[in-house]
Image (spheres, grey):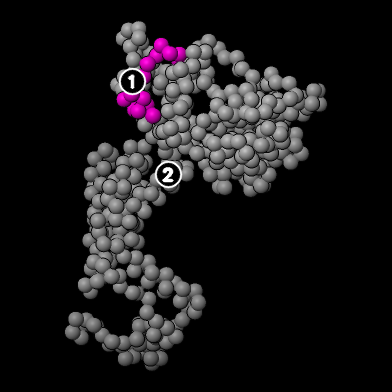
Amino acid sequence: MTFEPSLFGNTLPADGGAAPIEKLPPNAPLAARMRPRSLDEFVGQEQLVGPGTALRTAIERNALPSMIFWGPPGSGKTTLARLIASLTSARFVTLSAVSAGVADLRRAISDAKQAAAANGRHTILFIDEIHRFNKAQQDAVLPNVERGDITLIGATTENPSFEVNKALLSRSRVFVLALLGDDAIGVIVDRALADKERGLGPDVRLEREARAKLIALSGGDARSALNALELAAQIAASRGKGEPIAAHDIEEAMQQRSLRYDRAGDEHYDVISAFIKSVRDSDPDAGVYWLARMLEAGEDPMFVARRLVILSSEDVGLADPNALPIAVAAQQATHALGMPEALFPLTEATIYLALAPKSNSGLRAYGAAKAAVDERGALPVPLHLRNAATNLMRRLGYGEGYRYAHDFPGAKVEQQHLPDELKQSKFYEPGEVGWEADD
């Protein structure tokens, strides 16, 4: 648990005024030194803290609701929470949901009440990765949020609609922080290079190609960009004073880019959704790109293979009957090979399915048949289709009049196969492309 009291008085500065200077150790990371001191310095989330926005107005009026900040890593959730506490003269107490428990929550709330009683100072309780708290832990803080003992700011990379209790969610405002764009990362990098006091100062130079690579490899994560910039500056300096940071310095600092991807979180579902829709829309380039995004980030290749099998039936279907065998073959090959060799059958199947004609006639047929089942229930099987296994069944008419298909040319026989109430129904409608169109 960390306590970071504000140095402000009781008057809130206007126009995104500066927060008190936080004392940091001499060896503090560049990302910590470059934390913004005002709302105007807070880059890339103008939709949240720009002039006239609801959140900025609440900060300037010192009338904060409890909040949930939802956004990807490095988008500024923790930084914004610290800034809000400083600008509103609040005590700032942080807990990590990874390591804290109910006892820590109760201790923090008790301290908040004592501080309020002693000097009237309100507390902002910041819970990082709040989605990792279970229901009991989230419930423990709920009464204190309702009474106003604390102002809660929770930070999460996961969709709060699924990960935060409805009762707590209903008492909080959700603010979505966007992934930082290239322009925003560029501003943050340039500011760190120019700042003499907190940044690297004017003596450190960044080559244009290196700057572009740093922005691209940061993946919209400001903290990652600043950490890599600081390390790259040290690498360049080791070659000699005044040496500029080159693109290969950035690559070495980054080592292997950590792709923003959570196999159990929103990014997992967003990327697989993009993959499926790209293949469904017959875009092989996008299909292979999203495939690479998943595999390079460590996705289970069998998960991808299963999705290809589903897609081959659901979206290609009878327009190309070879699609399902190819997808199943890719799944079996993936199981036998593992990564990295599995990328070959997975890529081949992805491209084949993307280029194949598309039909969802199977899905539509099943949906229509299911609707009939839901509406009419379990209708009786026509007698002539029933199996006459005993003499009693034969006397009752089971199997009477059944016409054996192989007694007719092409094994096509005209007879009623649906219940009487549905005998005129048609569930399957062939698609207009590929194999179905030629049928």
* Disc 2 residue type (three-letter): His
> Label 1 amino acid?
Glu
Identify the residue at image location x=36%, y=19%.
Answer: 206
Residue 115: x and y, percent? 76, 24
Q: Tell me the element at label 2.
A: helix
Determine the image quadrant of residue 48.
Answer: top right
Residue located 46% across and 81% down the image:
379
Q: Is 287 drawn above or below residue 249 in the view shown?
A: below
The image quadrant where one finds the N terminus is top right
Q: Is mark 1 on a helix, strand or loop?
A: loop
Q: Residue at x 33, y 56 (%)?
A: 280
* Magenta residues, start to end: 200-215
* Identity of the residue drawn at 51% across and 30% down: 43
Relative side of 172 to 307, left or right:
right
Which image quarter holds the C terminus?
A: bottom left
- Residue 239, x across and y down, in percent: 31, 9
133 on left or right of 208: right
Disc 2 marks which residue?
268
Classify mark 2: residues with Cα within 10 Å, few (<14), some (14-19) or many (20+).
some
Q: Label 1: few (<14), some or many (≥20) within 10 Å?
A: few
Q: Confirm whether residue 151 shows in the render.
A: no
- The quadrant where residue 80 appears: top right
Query: Is residue 48 visible in the rendered structure shown here?
Result: yes
Mark 1–mark 2 Cα distance, whole angstroms, equals 35 Å
First in residue order: circle 1 vs circle 2: 1
- Residue 204 among magenta residues: yes
Nearer to me, 99 or 172: 172
Q: Residue 217 carries which label?
A: none
**Numbered label attached to residue 207:** 1
Q: Is residue 375 magenta?
A: no
Image coordinates of residue 21 in percent, x first then y, are 61, 17
